[in-house]
Image (tube, helix red, strand yellow):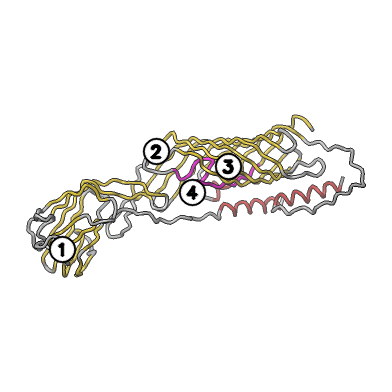
Amino acid sequence: MKRYYLFLSLIALLFLSCEKDDFCIDPITPNMIIRFYDATNTSNTKSVSNLSVNPEGLDVIYSNESLDSILIPLDVTSGQIIYNFSKGNNQDIITIDYDVEEVFVSRSCGFKAIFNNVTVTSDVSNDWIIGLTETSENTITIPTIENESAAHLQIFH
Amino acid sequence: MNQQRIYKFFIKICFLIVFVSAPAQQKNDSIPKDSIVYKTNYGLRLGIDISKPIRSLLQDYNSGLEIVGDYRISKKWYAAAELGNEEFTSNEDFTNSTSKGSYMKIGVNYNSYNNWLDMNNEIFIGLRYGFATFEETLNSYQVNTGNTILPTQSITTPSTQKGLTAHWTEIQLGFRAELYNNLFITFSSSYKIMVSITEPINFKTHYAPGFNRIYASNTGFGFNYTISYLIPFRKK
């Protein structure tokens, strides 16, 4: 019987040798891309100095940086996220409301979220943000955020 | 007789571990042909796959049962079929899903091994058409956000999609040895190519019963270890 035990254990080894063979390379949940523009000369981008960005109640994503575009994640577990945008000591609050749609990508990537009917609202205090459109409106609707190929939101200051 | 038993033992060893090519025999035309014809059994051979219970013990394999059968048509050809039922949970980085269902495979085996005397061993190549009907349950998942800034949550409300089907073709390579009179053990491996599959809505089947894990290129692999018994109908 000994040789059959040997055979059995050889077979068992065969089954134990399978490992993961794929890695997630497809695009997953997109971040929101924001570009900062000059409020007086609306076709030009303009960097924000001393920019700090953090989701309300959470740690900063950007801290005292000088940037003309940023990436911010949206919360896939709820339909709303509130961000604090600070330029030095001036703080503006941006509220983003959206519908989350979960889309299956692949075995290794799982599901991603895309965001539909995105409404962005800037608080009316306008400490340093003048508006979200060229005409300085404080609210804008974006039909969908499904990839990171282009900027989604313009902020004029 | 004793010498014959030694030969049998030797060939079984070869079948059981890795087949080592038997020393070539030289034909000698000057010796008159042996007039004794060694007859072998023809009939229906039935068995079960015992790799599935072994995998249930050793691996994250839920459960499975496979009944195998073949019927000898001619000296080299067998009609063969497998019937099974399986449940398997695919645990991935962001999803956990269970496939559950039944399958059937039908086809032929060709025995390419030339037996000594009345022995009945095989090195076979098999071709199969496979069909499975199953359901896929997404047990839990987590949306892949790619960031650690915001908290994520695992959704654990299972959702099941029923009535899924898969069709595939399969090529097998197997080694079969007669352990005792009419009792066989078989080790076979298979390579499968998916022909068509109905996918669940907004998800993907990760494992189809009978096909096993579906790789990105719609291919699959299988290993079987079966014990079967031949019900002899006649000797030829």
Crowd tier of the residue under label 3, counting other residues whose Cα lies within 10 Å: few below 14, some 14–19, many 20 or above:
many
Q: Is residue B208 magenta?
A: yes
- Residue type at mark 2: give it: Thr
Residue, disc 2: B160
Quadrant in the picture for residue B137: top left
Residue, disc 1: A44
Crowd tier of the residue under label 1, counting other residues whose Cα lies within 10 Å: few below 14, some 14–19, many 20 or above:
few
Q: Determine the residue positioned at 22% across, 64% down.
A: A60
Contact between marks 1 and 2 (CB within 8 A): the answer is: no
- Tell me how many marks there are: 4
Label 4, label 2: how far apart the Cα atoms are: 25 Å
Q: Are marks 2 and 3 on the same chain?
A: yes
Find residue B217 and name its label.
4
> Residue A128: where, in percent of width, then height?
10, 63
Quadrant in the picture for residue B227: top right
Outermost top residue: B233
- Label 2 sits on a secondary structure element that is strand
Q: Left or right: where does residue A19 sit relative to residue B125?
A: left
The stretch of residues the image draws in magenta is B205-226
Q: Are marks 4 and 2 on the same chain?
A: yes
Label 4 is found on which chain of the structure? B
- Label 4 sits on a secondary structure element that is loop
Label 2 is found on which chain of the structure? B
Q: Are marks 1 and 2 on the same chain?
A: no
Contact between marks 2 and 3 (CB within 8 A): the answer is: no
